[in-house]
Image: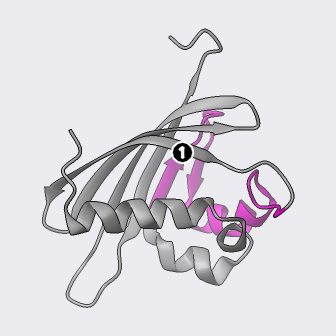
Amino acid sequence: MNRETDEVREAIAGELRLMDPSVRTSRSLARQLLDPDFVEVGASGRQWTYGEMLAELPELGGAAESGPRYEPSNFIGVLLAPGLVHLTYETTFDGNRARRSSLWRKQGAGATWQMYYHQATPIPPDGM
């Protein structure tokens, strides 16, 4: 049930930009898309803070132009409240699949949408 509002479309666009190698290797571009209160629980189980993610994103998977890239599918977005969008989707990266959930927020007039929270859960090879 994808409620295709402008807010949901903008959050999906931000999510896709964060998968772009040119954004992943640019701390200044990534900074624009991550909320200062950002937290991630990665598919490995590791928790990332805003500062850790900005520091390490250029070295993480999906950052090399010639390397494997994230292949997203099945986006579902819901506007939970003014300025708060929840996205769920799946990715395939280098043969590994994950279910993903993100919260995007926009604070105040003229602000941009930024990822506030992200979680990735591996999908076992049998797809269960």
- Is residue 36 something that shows in the picture? yes
Q: Label 1 sits on what residue type? A: Pro
Regarding mark 1 in the picture, which secondary structure is present there? strand
Residue 69 forms part of the magenta stretch: no
Which residue occupies 84% across, 53% down?
Answer: 67
Residue 61 forms part of the magenta stretch: yes
Disc 1 crowd rating (10 Å Cα; few below 14, some 14-19, many 20+) is: some
Give residue 66's quadrant in the image.
bottom right
The correct choice, above or below, for 50 with respect to 3 in the image is below
Along the viewing direction, whichever of 39 and 60 lies nearer the viewer? 60
Which residue occupies 59% across, 41% down?
Answer: 42
Give residue 11's quadrant in the image.
bottom left
For mark 1, what is the residue? 72
Task: Tell whether 93 sits left or right of 99.
Answer: right
Give residue 55's quadrant in the image.
bottom right
The correct choice, above or below, for 72 with respect to 115 in the image is above
- Is residue 37 something that shows in the picture? no
Furthest-bottom residue in this view: 110
Along the viewing direction, whichever of 16 and 84 lies nearer the viewer? 16
The correct choice, above or below, for 128 with respect to 31 in the image is above
Which residue occupies 62% across, 30% down?
Answer: 97
Residue 83 percent across, percent down from the top left: 20, 68
Give the number of marks: 1
Q: What sort of colour scheme is used for the picture?
A: one colour
